[in-house]
Amino acid sequence: MEDLLISPGTPYFLGSLAASLLAGLGLALMPPRPITVGMGASRLGSAARLAAGQVAGIAIAGLLIAVVVAGDVRGSARSLLLAMAIGGYIGLGLALPRQPEVRRQREAAALRRLTPGMIAFVRVGMGSFESPTAILGRYVAQGHPRIAPMRALVAEAMQIGQDKRLRPFAALALAARPRGCRELTDVAEALAQSEAEGSPVETVLAAQQATLELILQSEFKREMRRRTMCLLLMVAVSLVVGILINLLWIMTKGGAALTQIR
């Protein structure tokens, strides 16, 4: 390690490493430019982030490997630098570019779980002969942290409706499409169609709410069964390991045999 620190090329390697790290972070965190509209733009942005992350990760890993080779690093310092090279590639090349997509999938899953409650809220409001603007405004006024993703979406829809002078449910459909939640998009488009045609949408909302609740219940039961199986597997593994340790302890007469071997 001392040879690496006093090597003449160390400052240049460290400078290149810092510059590549900053450039890679900037490219990976750069928001995608709106080249096209819709899911194609989202896929293009994800591909651009992945490509930028791959370039940054390969650059970081290559520089660290070059430091190891050029500086003839040995011992623990060599293992540390190689581990940093692998970690830099995984972090910048794979994990960091996928963060926006992971957040989007989590948001879509949260919106999917909140969609039945949103349908029920709209049905109650429409049954009370409230205007769509009043219904969405009351939903945004709720302070429950659990509905924060849906509340943010509804607030964005109301802002879009004011900016573009759209009907409330049409703005809700426009705000829901990029979220990737198909069930919420179907509900919002049904509301927008009913609002444009002036037709009742109670039957459609009731059917969609019942279907979505059944789907969510089946998924919840499947998740509970999966977690139960994982828990049983962990208990079985712990039991087998404990039995093996006890058998080993008995076979070695309380560790006496191992002491004699030493």
Image (cartoon, grey):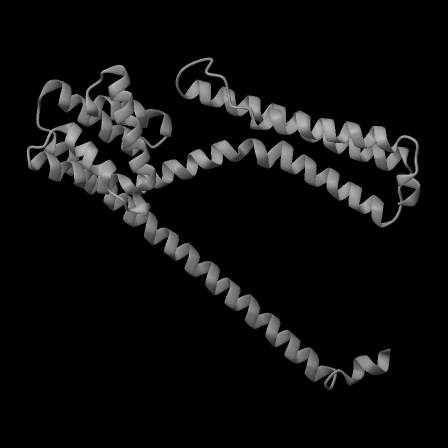
| Image position, residue 84 (x, y; %) | 74, 41
Q: Nearer the viewer, residue 93 or 241?
A: 93
Q: Nearer the viewer, residue 6 or 34?
A: 6
Relative vertical location of residue 37 with respect to residue 63 in this rendering, above or below: above
Looking at the rendered image, the quarter that the N terminus falls into is top right
Relative vertical location of residue 243 with respect to residue 39 in this rendering, above or below: below
| Image position, residue 196 (x, y; %) | 14, 18
Which residue is at 42% across, 55% downward? Answer: 226
In the orientation shown, which residue stands out farthest toward the top? Answer: 35
Relative vertical location of residue 104 with respect to residue 199 in this rendering, above or below: below
Dividing the picture into quarters, in which one does residue 142 lie? Answer: top left
Q: Nearer the viewer, residue 111 or 146?
A: 146
Q: Nearer the viewer, residue 129 or 262?
A: 129
Which residue is at 85% across, 37% downward? Answer: 68
Looking at the rendered image, the quarter that the C terminus falls into is bottom right
| Image position, residue 92 (x, y; %) | 64, 33
Q: How many marks?
A: 0
Dividing the picture into quarters, in which one does residue 214 lie? Answer: top left
Which residue is at 69% across, 37% downward? Answer: 88
Classify residue 249 as left or right of residue 207. Answer: right
| Image position, residue 69 (x, y; %) | 88, 35
Classify residue 102 as left or right of residue 2. Answer: left
